[in-house]
Image (cartoon, rainbow, N blue to C red):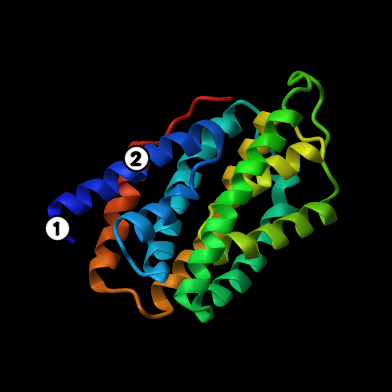
Amino acid sequence: MGTGTLALVAAANALVGACVGLTGIAGFLLPMFYAGFLGLAPVEGLALSFAAFVVSGTLGCPAYRRTGDLLLRASLGLLAGSFLGALAGTQIGLILPADVLTVILYLVVLGSGASVLLRMRAGEKDEDAPASLPATGRLFVVGAVTAVVCAASGAGGPVLVVPILMLMGVGPRMAVGMALLDSVAIAVPATVGYLFGGGVSAEVWGASSRGAAGTRGGRSSRQL
């Protein structure tokens, strides 16, 4: 990758990182950028994207933790399900042909638009109302199912998790905080799986660190 391309990678990660920190949603744009704009192979785009999600989620969580919008113990079921689901989703992503991965990615993007509409409708309720936390078993199932889809397609996780949590009665800010932490549980096994799963060039390995740095520079600690 040339200097200009690396600059674009850093800029894209910075922009997406800011959006993720603000709303929890936007990570799904990165694999589209890598595959559609830069022309990388889907697996390479997924490796770069998930490496960036590790950074954005890790840096975004403390802000929600400080405001009380991220309850670690209440998130354990979601995290456990997502970690296991991401392991399975990554293997699916490595097995499927590149064309199929591309179709899955665009279908997830289409679904993300619907999820935003659902989130807007769920957000009409009073944000000051006490948050209702779903049972651990239900969160485990949500985490496992969404992580399989996200790890196989390149979506960060919050684009699906935030609307689902809100529909289950979780307040908007808490839903974003939990989803950001959940994105790390998805991104860690997915990043390792795609980087070491083969088919990733040395250039992409180097770009993953630069892209992650761009995501860190673009993080935002603002709340909804």
Q: What x and y, as percent, mark residue 41?
A: 36, 70
Among all residues in the image, which is located at the extreme left? 3
Against 127, residue 32 (above or below) is below
Question: The N terminus lies in which quarter of the figure?
Answer: bottom left
Which residue is depicted at the point 32% across and 38% down? 217
Q: Nearer the viewer, mark 2 or mark 1?
A: 1
Helix, strand or loop at mark 1: loop
The one of 73 and 15 positioned closer to us in this rendering: 15
- Locate residue 208 relative to residue 65 in the image: left or right: left
Which residue is depicted at the point 79% across and 39% down? 167
Q: What residue did someone put label 1 on?
A: 2
Against 55, residue 21 (above or below) is above
Q: Is residue 105 visible?
A: yes
* Local crowd size for mark 1, using a 10 Å CA cut-off: few (<14), some (14–19), many (≥20): few
Question: The C terminus lies in which quarter of the figure?
Answer: top right
Q: Is residue 80 visible?
A: no
Disc on res. 182: none
Q: What x and y, as percent, mark residue 148?
A: 64, 65
Disc on res. 14: 2
Q: What x and y, as percent, mark residue 202?
A: 24, 72
- Locate residue 128 relative to residue 50 in the image: left or right: right
Q: Earlier in the sequence, mark 2 or mark 1?
A: 1
Which residue is depicted at the point 82% across and 25% down? 130
The one of 167 and 75 positioned closer to us in this rendering: 167
Q: What x and y, as percent, mark residue 126?
A: 77, 19
Helix, strand or loop at mark 2: helix
